[in-house]
Image: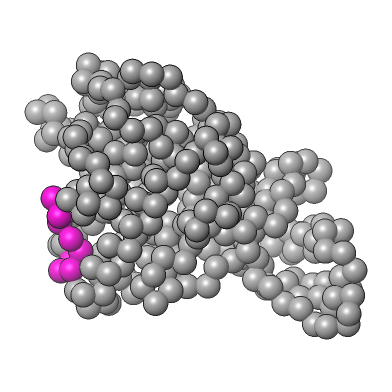
Amino acid sequence: MLQPERDLGELRDALTAWLRTRIPGARDLAIAELTRPKAGFSNDTLLLDVSWVDEGGRGRAERLVARFAPAEFRVFPEYDLIAQAHVMRCLGATGVPVPRVRWIEEETRVLGQPFYIMDAIAGELPSEVPPYQSFGFCFDATPARRARIWWNGLETLARIHALDWRALGLGFLGVPGTGTDPLDRQLAYWDRYLEWTVRGRPAQPILAHALAWLRDHRYTPRHVALCWGDARLPNLIYRDDEVAGVLDWEMAFVGDPEADLGWWLFMHWATGEGYGLPPLEGFPERDATIRRYEALTGRPVEHPLYNEVLAALRFGAIMARIGGRMADLGIPPPWPDYETNTQCHQRLAVLLDLSPPGRS
């Protein structure tokens, strides 16, 4: 846990009092259980089992999820928790299965930070820590089941990219201009992110080189769409191998949907083979995934290398930030110089023909 842990008893009392003001006519409202999920670096999330008696005298019980803005350590320079909730509310009637956001609290007086509460979605999540390639139901699944899980996730990604983001009111994420502007916006963001990450930390020459390469090889996207931003299996809830929930919209943006596909593919590699784990039979290969995405969207994938480099840069910058936090807290990293030598750095060195990062 990279965030300071708050007292669960105090949180339970504060949330109980707050929920009593949000559910009309509720009597005897109580939070029976309050737990933290194991994964997640950029925010604080709590699972709540809430019970009460409604106005008709009937007992009610619901499982809810509370998500808070980071209290101390931030993975991202700016963290717009409320925008995440609004994205999910905009998608609520689209058929993309996002959690229903019940309440948003923008004031800090309740818990010291903004938060929102949404419905929990029952189902299975591919493991994030440890990676699903080494633990959990994906690891234990048959090859045929792994293929179903993968393809159903990819189909959900294609459905997101088919949405009319303007009609859904998602312009608050930023409206790109013509030409290379959809890419320029992303590169400008990650330039600021990298500058923020290296402030007072070791330099990141490989990430800086990748950013320069991306600027030099910009292109004009044929299609601009809502991009999930964090498209990967551990952000999907499955029920009977179908996608029942799409989570974590903190990195959402409007841009080239090929960036989402590049992230989907790279994150699968980075959290599996990138950590030295052998490929699991059943998960489709990169080329087959690209061909299937093309069939689902009716559009050719024209810039797979560019968006693999972009994904490696993005995740590399994030992991450099997290690696620095681990060092500050005395948490042992996967290897000694992890902050400047993640699997992302190593992959970028191969893709861009750079000298490999050395290990101390």
Q: Residue at x 33, y 18 (%)?
A: 179
x then y, percent, for residue 316: 31, 37
Report whether residue 81 is seen.
no
In this picture, residue 281 sits left or right of residue 238: left
x then y, percent, for residue 51: 76, 76
x then y, percent, for residue 109: 81, 43
Magenta-colored stretch includes residue 49 = no
Q: Residue at x 34, y 50 (%)?
A: 158
Q: Residue at x 38, y 25 (%)?
A: 182
Report whether residue 241 is seen.
yes
Quadrant in which the C terminus appears: top left
Examine the image and state in which quarter residue 350 appears. Answer: top left
- Residue situated furthest bottom in the rendering: 58
Magenta-colored stretch includes residue 285 = yes
In this picture, residue 204 sits left or right of residue 109: left
Q: Closest to the observer: 158 or 193?
A: 158
Magenta part, dominant SS: loop
In this picture, residue 292 sits left or right of residue 124: left
Q: Residue at x 72, y 77 (%)?
A: 61
Examine the image and state in which quarter residue 336 appears. Answer: top left
Q: How many marks?
A: 0
Relative to 168, say whether 272 is above or below. below
The segment highlighted magenta reads 280-288
Q: Closest to the observer: 231 or 312?
A: 231
Q: Closest to the observer: 356 or 76?
A: 76
Examine the image and state in which quarter residue 352 appears. Answer: top left
